[in-house]
Image (cartoon, rainbow, N blue to C red):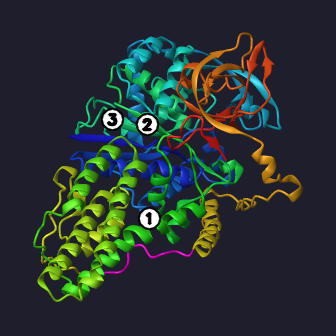
Amino acid sequence: MKYYLTTPIYYVNATPHIGHAYTTLVADTVKRVRRMMGDDAYLCTGTDEHGQKVERSAEKAGWTAQEFADRVSGAFRSEWDSLGIDYDFFVRTTEPRHAGAVQWLFERCQKNGFIKKDTYTGKYDVTGEAFVTDEEAQKIDGPVEVVTEENYFFKLSEFQDRLLKHYEDNPDFIRPESRRNEVISFVKGGLKDLSISRASLKWGIPLPGDDGHVFYVWFDALTNYMTALGYGGDAEVDPEGLWPADLHIVGKEIVRFHAVYWPAFLMAADLPLPKGIYAHGWLIFQEEKMSKTKGNVVRAQPIDQVVGIEGLRHYLLREIVFGQDGNFSYEGLVGRYNADLANGLGNLASRTLAMIHRYFDGAVPEPPDDSGGALAVLATETIAKVRAHFEAFEFSRGLDAIWALSGAVDKYLVEQKPWVLIKGEDEETKAQLRTTLYNAAEVLRIVTALASPVLPKSAAEIWRQLGQESDLTAVRYAGLAWGQLKPGTKLPGGEAVFPRLDVEASIKKMQELEQEVLKEQAQIMGRTVEAAPAARQKPADSERIEIDDFAKVEMRVGVVMTAEKVKKADKLLHLTIDIGEAEPRSIVAGIAAAYEPDSLIGRKVAIVANLKPRKLRGLVSDGMIIAASGEDGNPNLVSFLEDAPIGARLG
């Protein structure tokens, strides 16, 4: 079976950072998982290179727009190559083949009656010569005018019912559930026709039949998924038979474009829709979403040079529940590396292989009984668990299962004490030693295979050190079973795969290298070096509170039972929340701008439970729901990665 997945194409007005790397590393992992499932998997990525921002950045740097795009696109491709991303297609929107695909898709939509020419009115930055959003207009010092120009529009308004029916008929089309609910709510709110061209821009793909217009943003960018496969011109079917895509992996901030605009374009063109879209969350660093404008961006190359890219892959997939926002910290990265990789898998490999070298002259011993006992049962169960979790994008749970198996054999070695058994002279003790080290090596083989989609390079090295001459990438879940390690296999030896890291020294080195990479990327962009983000200052003692003050605040876990909008109050929702008391709490919260009532039913939240009740809009509010203020000013509810019990106290 063929499986085609994609990352978004990355906009070349910024050089690659860890946010880009997160999406791409996940997609690379998914490709390797699908290959282990037996699929013929393909991965597409690339760069989005058109638009006013690129043109202006190029002019500022003293280059043509094409020269600028070449430099930054090259930086992305170089990054993915150095990080070992196994992509099959790399699409640049400045390629002639992509222009052909975009124009081909447009003509199909136009032929079917879904394109119109109309006027577009928006705020125009006079100095920057570009249309801007309301938010961008507030930040501009120079004059901003309301300008009307003639554009081509896509009749998005005609697809509301068709999109909603598609979502209903295909419940897994948008994942996770929170993003699905968000998209459905947006579409139910009504769709407006979408401007897909600009007459005021020059750096873009010209519309067929009207060279005075170029394609604008999403009609151009999204089509890359079909460009990669050869669509365009007379090509109505890709030769590999990969369309429709099986999965688009995107960040949550662009889910609307992929789950609303893109399927509507394809419907209008009478083309098959992708089978699924998965929107992951943001990486949070220094308590905020990573953002170039905030100066809190982290880059992957310094991490690769100190921890190794596979330490980063493992950290991101183990620490972050895929689909949710997740915290990134250097301390957490090095700590997780030492705990799971250096002290875990790395230590298991080193001690097991070292004892086989020492006690059996580097040849896998033959056990008198190859059943494996309880370890074999656990290994067989783990293979099934990991496959199921990885297939469902539950990477953290899949890795939990792998490290549980690794931990079980560590415990087994401690109990069996092979370093004591080697001293025994009787046949029973010798047989027990052979069994112990064979079982440990066999678990190591299975753990290595299971971890290979996340740790492809390191796993391949451990596989080699186990004397396995077969290609690790050829291993399939269906064929992975206990007892496949052949007794007598000679172990070739090798260095430790995951040497332990000094936490403080490693963090310092990554931070130093971060500044070097920042300088290199600034040169690529033709910019002066940005200042390093200032370290967060600890609050003065006078701003801190005593533990006794904190203890006065009673925070509890609750589950939302009902939710409805408060009449004549745009920002308020009335919730009833069960926190394990005789009756649910009535709470009025100012979260209506960020959450639809239906999306909150059944959601676990945190509340302050010991506030004095008060009345809002005639309703009793007996408590306060806990939320963070998002980058856009909207609240983000506190949620739980683990299954916290209702009524549990926080603190």
Residue at mark 1: 340
Residue 181 is situated, as x and y percent measured from the top left of the image, at: 50, 24
- The kind of residue tagged 3 is Ala
Q: Furthest-front residue in view?
A: 582
Mark sitting on residue 278: 2
Which residue sits at x=83%, y=38%? 141
Q: Is residue 500 magenta?
A: yes
From this viewpoint, is residue 651 visible?
Answer: yes
The disc, 2 or 1, on the residue closer to the chain's N-terminal end is 2
Closer to us: 440 or 320: 440
Contact (Cβ within 8 Å) of mark 1 with mark 3: no
Let me know if residue 206 appears in the view. no
Residue at horizontal 37 percent and vertical 32 percent from the top: 276
* Nearer the camera: disc 3 or disc 2: 2
Residue contact at pointers 3 and 2, CB within 8 angstroms: no
Dot 2: element:
strand
Image height of 136 relative to 196, above or below: below
Position of 619 relative to 559 (above/below): above
C-alpha separation, residue under disc 3 versus residue under disc 2: 12 Å
Which three-letter amino acid code belongs to the residue tagged 1?
Asp
Tell me which segment is drawn in magenta. Answer: 494-502
Residue 569: image x %, image y %? 74, 15
User: Where 210 falls versus 464 (above or below)?
Assistant: above
Cα distance in 3D space between marks 1 and 3:
34 Å
Residue 427, picture quadrant: bottom left
First of labels 3, 2 by sequence position: 3
Query: Which quadrant of the structure image shows residue 534?
Result: bottom right
Residue 508 % position (x, y)? 64, 72
Q: Secondary structure at mark 1?
A: helix
104, 468: nearer the viewer? 468
